[in-house]
Every structure is written in structure tokens, then in C-alpha cells.
Image (spheres, coloured by chain):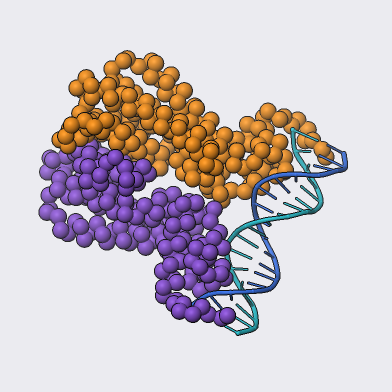
Chain colours: A purple, B orange, C cyan, D blue
Amino acid sequence: MARKTGSDGKKTAQVLRVAATRLFAQYGYAAVSMRQIATEVGVQAGALYLYTPDKQTLLYQIMDGHMDDLLAAWRAERAKTPDDPMQQLEQFVRFHIRFHLNRGDEIFIAYMELRNLSAENFTLIEAKRREYEGLLGEILQAGNRLGHFSLCDIKLSSYAIIAMLTGVSTWYRGDGRLSLEKIEEVYLCMVRGLVAQGGARVGAASA
Amino acid sequence: MARKTGSDGKKTAQVLRVAATRLFAQYGYAAVSMRQIATEVGVQAGALYLYTPDKQTLLYQIMDGHMDDLLAAWRAERAKTPDDPMQQLEQFVRFHIRFHLNRGDEIFIAYMELRNLSAENFTLIEAKRREYEGLLGEILQAGNRLGHFSLCDIKLSSYAIIAMLTGVSTWYRGDGRLSLEKIEEVYLCMVRGLVAQGGARVGAASA
DNA sequence: GTCTATAGAAGGATAGAC
DNA sequence: GTCTATCCTTCTATAGAC
């Protein structure tokens, strides 16, 4: 049998991405074999190489696609939000939590598999990560300038906020005791408190 | 040659732990081979099995030892701190940052390699993680009760604080632009702001 | 306590049939 | 576009010499 009846290259390529994403997230890039992925896709191992030159590229493409989605999604969201730092910050908090909960697997990979990227691929992904952090930084900077926030270090505040928001995906369960809306509210309040005095007493702004 | 001159079993066991910790942190458990570890230790692969029954146990022992150290260290630190929620929280923030920066490798493993633990080992480690989160939770609870904090969900606040503090180790470089002391100060202020209104407006306390 | 040697399984990737 | 078959490497873990 040469080709499966009803097989479809486009579709298989998509299925491959989905399967690899799930498996990498669950077991880790290094722990997943091409054979495992093939089984999940429903083809033989050799057939995978029609859709990716190698395993490393597969990982890179998943992470790169995710970062592009993330950046595009936030820029779209931001465009719909009034040009006020506090409103933009609140929108960012809601956006980040929601986006990450919808894509638990990609996020997990994006944060956990950086070290399994080749040096050049790492550089490319890292740039997009910094780009995203910078977008939050812009909001914080503007809020500081207008006197709405009181942050002494924009970079550290960006890191702290992104870290605490991303952390949600490590424990969130759809059937847990808290609804997504409630979680967003709680985190919103914590972030509001954080930016209200995140370094005010430490001294002059350094960033 | 049967035994290396001057070889020492106790010492080799220790060197093995250190080497495995470093390599697991750098490349990930699944990506590191027993041969790599042996090379780092300076023995042949087979000799490792004198000190660990298998690779999985090696990982578990590293993580378990780290959690024990972490819990013991915080309890010692707490004992030296006045019985006041705000002071204890501040001490916790300083402690967590400092402890984690001194042990970047262990921390990295503790957070990244959970999924590579066997089911039973995972349960054991997870219990100690929850125990640590609970110790922060106690402080937050006490602060809420005394009216010093204004948190609507103790668990979420614990998660958020630990996530943002642990995040420091993902970007901290000893030779960076900020000193450890300065970083501690900035995070302290952010945490102060966070607990001051981390959910106050959301409604009644639920935890 | 460490070595060499190796068993036995699994890995990534390719070649060529259909 | 997918399969089968396979090459070659690497892996964990063990056996037995010293």
C-alpha cells in the first residue's frame, strides 16, 4: 500500500504540529521520540520527514508560531483598548491569563524547552520573548510617566508580572473551584497593588 | 586497572550528585545520558550504578534533597523572625530570592523536571511543594486576620508571589546591572503593594 | 571502587517500493 | 503521500576482570 486512501498532506502537516505540541508539552522535547509522534499522527516514522526536516526544526516551528500568535493577538487586543495605561494594563492581565490558559501546551513548551533549541533558534525565539516583555514595559513606562504607577524598575516589574500571570497555567484546572473570571479579578487586584507601589520607596527610577 | 588510586566512594557519590544536578539543569533530564554524567564525574558509565540504582532515582534524590533543604532553611529563617505577618512576609521574600539564586540549578530542576518523575516520586515531591506554599499561606492568612493584608484568596496569592519570586532566577546574572540587595528591595515593594490590595475589591475572603 | 566490554533496546534519519 | 526496511548511533544497565 503506497498511500493511504483519503490521506491529505495539508491535513497531515497540521495533525503533526498538534500531536508534537501535545507530546512535547506532556513529556518534554528530549523525552519524545519521532516514533511516538508518528504513532499519534497515525503514520509511520519515516513519513514525518515529509513535513519537517528534523526534530529540532519541529520544535522551533512550534515555538515560533506560538510567539507570532501571541504578539499578534496582544497587538490586536491593544488596538481595541483605550490609550490609558491603567486600562491597558488591566487588558494585558486579562489577555495574558486567557491566552495562556487556552494554549497550555504551547506555553509550557515556550517556557520549558528553550534550552533544547539550537543556538541560532534560541536567539530568534528569545528576541520575540523580549519583544513581548517590551510591550508590557511600554504600558508600565507610560503609567509611570503619568504618575498612575509608582514603579522604580520597568524591566523587573515586567518580569514579575509576566511570571505571576504565566504561573496560572501551572495550576489552573477548568473544573477547579475558581472560574476564569474570578481568577482574572484576583490577579487584576494583585497587579493593581503591585504597580501602585512597586518600588516607590526604593529610590529614583532606573529604567 | 581496577580501582583508581586515591578514589573515595563517599566523595564520588557527592561528585555524582553535583554533576548530575548541573547537567540536568542545563540540558534537561531526558536529554542527559548516564555517559555524559560519568564523563563529568570522571568515571566510566558503569561505575555510576554503584551510587544510584538508576537514572530516575538520581533525579528524585536531587529534587527531594532540594525540597528538604528548602523547607528546613525557611523554617530556620522563620524561627529567627518576629511573629509579625509583615515582617515574616518580608523575610520570606528575601529568603526565597536569595535561596533560589544560590541554587539556580536545583530550582530549575525542581520546577522543570516534575513531569520526568515517576508517578510515585511525583506524588512525594508534590507534597513537599505544597508544604512550602502552605508556609507562605500561613503568613498571608495571619496578615489577613490582623487586617494588615487585604487578600481575597490565600492560595492564589501564594502562587502569584512564589511565581514572581522564582522568576528572578530565570533572568538574574551575578554581573547584571542590579545588585541582589536592590533586587530584593524592588520585589519587596511589589509584594507589599500586592498584599495591600490583592483582591480586596473582589469580594469576601474565600480562603 | 573502578574498569572494560557488551547485551539489548531505542533513538534519528534515509532509501526505495508502491 | 505513505509504507517497509534498515543504517548507524546512542542509550540504560549489567557482568566480570582487577
Who is closer to the viewer here, B175 or B207? B207
Quadrant where the N terminus of chain A sits is bottom right
Relative horizontal placement of residue B49, taking residue B144 as reference (left or right): right
In terms of image quadrants, where is residue B155?
top left
The residue at 39%/54% (across/down) is A105
Who's the residue at 30% across and 44% down the image?
A165
Q: Is residue A38 above or below residue A86?
A: below
Task: Mark yes or no: residue B69 visible.
Answer: yes
Give residue D2's position: percent from left, percent from top. 53, 75
Is residue A124 in view from this perspective? no
**Number of numbered tags placed on the structure image:** 0
- Left or right: A34 in relation to B70: right
Report x, y in % for residue B106: 50, 36
Task: Give the vertical position of A6 relative to A150 (above or below).
Answer: below
Depth order, front residue of A13/D2 = D2
Is residue C13 toward the left or the right of residue A139 in the image? right
Tell me which corner region of the image, top left, top right, bottom left or bottom right, holds residue A47: bottom right
Residue A151, position as x, y percentages in the image: 21, 38
Residue beneath the point at 41% across and 29% down: B132
Question: With B68 as the anchor, is A194 left or right in this view?
Answer: left
Query: What residue is drawn where x is 19% and y is 50%?
Result: A91
Residue C6 x/y as whole percent: 80, 53
- The image quadrant where one finds the C terminus of chain A is top left
